[in-house]
Image (cartoon, rainbow, N blue to C red):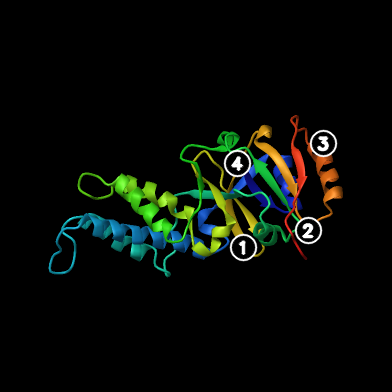
Amino acid sequence: MIWHYTNAQGLLGILGSRTLWASSADYLNDFSELHFGRTAFIAALDRVVKQLGGSTDEHGKPLRGWGLWVTAEHMRERFSPESVPRLPGAFVTSFCSDGDLLSQWRGYSGGAGFSIAFDEGLLASIKGAGSQLVPVVYGDEAIAVFADKIWAHLDGDDDLTVENLGDLLKHVSEFKHDSFKEEKEVRLRVQSSEAQEVRVRAQGDRLIPYVVLPFKDEAVVEIRVGPGLDQRTQASALRHFIKASGYGHEITVSGSVAPFRN
């Protein structure tokens, strides 16, 4: 199971509509997340160029893997702080591998929230073409993982085709700084298509593009009441809502045991 943390309003919206929202990866809460993934990609390109070995010309440009070196230089310019590049239609929604994680209760719902457990296998019902459920990779490990992906995509000239480069860039949103490691995040990455309607929602003073992902009833396995709430009354109200919403299977309702303090 993987867990999605949310507040009371989010819980009712998710269960009532039987949908999740995947936000554009360009509009993540912390821009540094995306910057870290881009930086890791460039560092991985540099690593592969170095691993290819070979001599260099009088300007220090590698004679082998020259095309890859050019790609790295292009990415450095494209991903500079002054530029506003866009990922190729990537949308993400976040989950956690732990359904009772104190840092998640504090960070996402102030302790007074809920975590929804989804069956990973049944989440396949909301995945479209080009989508993937992936654990987030943290810190320096991201460079090694990206380097492995680059090696797997190299063509016979030790270079990347435009198609392969685009495929690699889809993974930028799967990497975060090591300081986020305790989040234990798993992301559903969705590549938008012309068939999907991209909507826009408000989050405070910001506008966030997103796509709607419907799921089957049976994908919801358990719902946990946060430690900052009166768990007995909230669990009772939650059971009433589940029944009124027409869910025909048993959904476990439990309470957090995390040692939360207001």
Disc 4 from disc 1: Cα separation: 21 Å
Calculate the distance from the C-alpha at mark 1 to the C-alpha at mark 2: 28 Å
Is residue 239 visible from the viewing direction of this image? Answer: yes
- Relative placement, left or right, of 113 versus 95 is right
Amino acid residing under circle 1:
Arg
Q: In this orientation, which residue lies closer to the viewer: 171 or 13? A: 171
Sequence order check, earlier mark of 1 and 2: 1
The mark closer to the camera, 1 or 2, is 2
Disc 1: which residue: 206
| Residue toward you, 258 or 7 | 258
Q: Is residue 227 above or below residue 211?
A: below
Q: Name the residue under label 2.
A: 228
Question: Marks 3 and 1, Cα distance to the nearest angstrom?
Answer: 34 Å
Residue that label 4 marks: 213
Q: Is tag 3's residue or tag 2's residue first in the polypeptide sequence?
A: 2
Q: How far apart are marks 4 and 2 (CA)?
A: 29 Å
Alpha-carbon distance for marks 4 and 3? Answer: 22 Å
Mark 3, residue position: 244
Q: Which amino acid does label 2 sit on?
A: Gly
**Badge 2: residue crowd in 10 Å (few <14, some 14–19, many ≥20):** many
**Where does the image place residue 10, in percent across and percent down from the top left?**
71, 50
Mark before the other along the chain sequence, 3 or 1: 1
Quadrant of the frame with the C terminus:
bottom right
Residue 113, percent across and down? 74, 54
User: Tag count in the figure?
Assistant: 4
